[in-house]
Structure formats: structure tokens, C-alpha cells
Image (cartoon, grey):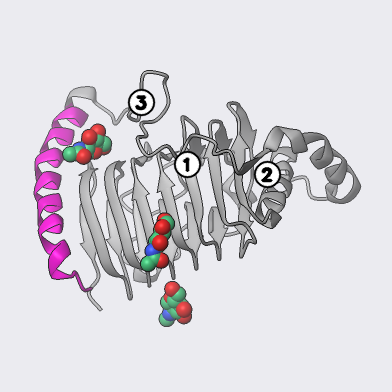
Amino acid sequence: MHISHGKLSSFVVSLLSYLILFSFLEDYVISAGTVQQNEAPRDDNGRAESSDGLEIVEPDEKVFNVMQYRDKATSIINDYDSAFSEVTIDQKMMWITFDDACKHPGKARMVIPKGQYKVNGLTFPGPCRSKRIVIQLFGDLIGPTDSSLLPNPYWIDFYRLSNVILLGTGGTIDGSLRDDGINCGDDDECVPSTPCNVLFEYCSNMIVKGIISIYPRAHHLNMEHCSNMTFENLYLNTLARSSDTDGISARNSSFIKISNSVIATGGDCISLDDGSTNFDISNITCGPGRGIRLVLS
Ligand SMILES: *[C@@H]1O[C@H](CO)[C@@H](O)[C@H](O)[C@H]1NC(C)=O
Ligand SMILES: *[C@@H]1O[C@H](CO)[C@@H](O)[C@H](O)[C@H]1NC(C)=O
Ligand SMILES: *[C@@H]1O[C@H](CO)[C@@H](O)[C@H](O)[C@H]1NC(C)=O
């Protein structure tokens, strides 16, 4: 683990604020009896805070609204997927919308409007032709309550993408797994491969902002082989008590900025594993679990 000198001071500051905020959270947990699902920071219109204009559709941007793909998704499901009952119409609709957004040569915006969407698994595969894709989440993505329906050790997967912005504007990523989560015990190998709500694999130049993630099977966000990623204004809350439920877990990832977020989990708040370098972490509220874990290698 290497932290450049420039980043060291902000890292120390983060650790200090972590210690201060940790004691605050602990008080909160005791007085409330249980960790509540707090509201993420909102502006006056009830949207998650934003000051960089990412939520505003630019004139040269093409909007792909998932609801406009619903009929097509229904017919495709009828034709090809009836044998696979675990593929939902909502899920199919997301896939084909993203496929179109990904092929669009200019700027694209995939909009998921307010509402609830049942998805048992979802991959956003790259590389894309688009100059930039904003995936804007107003609605709630709901995972399967039966974890045997998860075919992979992740629920939502961003794969080989670059210049993609995942923007939460009020929507929630709800893994729906309200049991105690997993328990790794002494199994060290368990941690990097544990199931997560969202996995980023071989991604770069991404911004993940305003995302609310709750009830994951184990981790909230895993990152593998990624670089130049910015995570901000996240709200990750695990109501399950598992001590192996981590907030953000990274392997072989570099130049990652994580800031202005609340990570309330039973396990590690942020875990930096094998080959992760140049992390800039600041203003993170951690607890009631552990803090920032560095695996030096
Ligand atoms: C890092 O990603 C941002 C987009 O999130 C992009 O604007 C910037 O140019 C990238 N930096 C490098 C060095 O690729
Ligand atoms: C680490 O990630 C980079 C991409 O960021 C990839 O090219 C490389 O193969 C990965 N290394 C290992 C050991 O997985
Ligand atoms: C720290 O992050 C919180 C959100 O968790 C935000 O409300 C607050 O403004 C941030 N503080 C600074 C100094 O950026």
C-alpha cells in the first residue's frame, strides 16, 4: 500500500474525522437501539445534493429512458427467456436500454425514473462507443430476497467501462438481503470474493455519485482492476449485523478518490487489498463496524 505524500495529510485528517465521527455514531447506535436507515443528504427538491450539474441534461446529450424499452423487453422475454424465470422484464429492459446507450456515439444518458425495478442480476458491459454515459437513478433497484437467484458473487456489475457516471438522484440500490449476511470466520480468501451489491471490474474514468446502497448480501461496492475512479456523496448502510459486511472493498485498483460519504456497516468501512495504490480518502463517516483497513503488499 502506497500513499503519496500529497495524500498523506488528507488521509490523516480522514482518520481523525473518522475517530471523532465514530464515537458520534456509536452514541447514536446506542440511543437508537439499532442502526436506522438514515436519509442521504438531499436538496430542497428532495434530490441528493449536487453542485456540479451532472444531473442536468446537456443539449448534445441523448436520453435513453428505460420505460421506453418496456414493451420491447416484454416481447423479448416472451420469445426467448420464458425458460429463465429469474430474468425479469425490468432487468431485460435495463440491458437493452444500456445496449443502445452504449452504442450511441455521442453523449448518452440512461434514465431510470422513479419507481421500483426488480432485477435479479444486471451487467453493464463495455467497452462502449459513447463519449460519455450518465446512468441516472431516480428509481429503486430491488434485488432478489432469495440469494440462490444470484448467479454470480455480485448483483450489479460494471464491466470494462470508461467515462461512465453512475448518478444517484434519490434512487436506492437495495440488495434485499435482510438476513445476517455472510460470515467469513477465519477464511481470509472469503473477503475479496464475497458477494456485493455493485462490482466494478476493469473500469476507469468513472464517477459514482449520490448512490444509496442498502441490504447487500455482504459488501456494498467491490472494485477490481480499476483506475481513476471518483466516489462521492455515497450512503452505504447495512442493516444486517454481519462483521464481514464491508462498505468499499478494492483490489488492484489505483488513483481512486472516495469522499463526503456515510458508510455504516458491520465490517470494514473501506478495505484496500492486493495491489491497491494511490487512494485519496476524505470526509468519510464510518461505523458501527471497523474503519479503513490496509492490506500492505
Ligand atoms: C479521470 O476521470 C475523469 C472522469 O471521471 C476524467 O475527466 C479525467 O480526464 C481522467 N483522468 C485521467 C488521467 O485519465
Ligand atoms: C491490475 O489491473 C490492471 C488494470 O487496471 C490490469 O491490466 C492488470 O492485469 C491487473 N493486475 C492483476 C495482477 O490482476
Ligand atoms: C462531509 O460529507 C458530508 C456527507 O457525508 C457532507 O454533508 C459535508 O458537507 C462534507 N463536509 C465537507 C467539509 O465537505
In the rendered image, which residue does mark 1 sit on? 167
Name the foreground residue: 225 vs 7.
7
Image vertical order of residue 86 relative to residue 113, above or below: below
Q: Earlier in the sequence, mark 3 or mark 1?
A: 3
Q: Identify the residue under disc 3.
A: 42
Q: Residues within 10 Å of mark 1 (few under 14, many from 20)?
A: many
Q: Quadrant of residue 42?
A: top left
Q: Amino acid at mark 1?
A: Leu
Which span of residues is magenta-colored?
Answer: 1-30
- Identify which residue is drawn at 68% across, 44% down: 94
Residue 192 drawn at (x, y percent): 40, 66
Q: Is residue 260 toward the left or the right of residue 153 in the image? A: left
Q: Mark 2 or 1, which is nearer the eye?
A: 1
Judging by the rendered image, the residue that carries numbered circle 2 is 94
Q: Amino acid at mark 2?
A: Met
| Residue at the (18%, 34%) spot, across then down | 25
SS of the residue at dot 1? strand
Other-residue count near label 2 (Cα within 10 Å), few / some / many at <14 / 14–19 / ≥20: many
Circle nearer the N terminus (2, 1): 2
- Mark 2 C-beta closer than 8 Å to ligand 1: no
Give how far apart the Cα atoms at labels 2 and 1 are. 15 Å
Does dot 2 land on a helix, a strand or a loop?
Answer: helix
Ligand 2 lies in quarter: bottom left
> Could you tell me which residue is drawn at 64 percent across and 49 percent down?
149
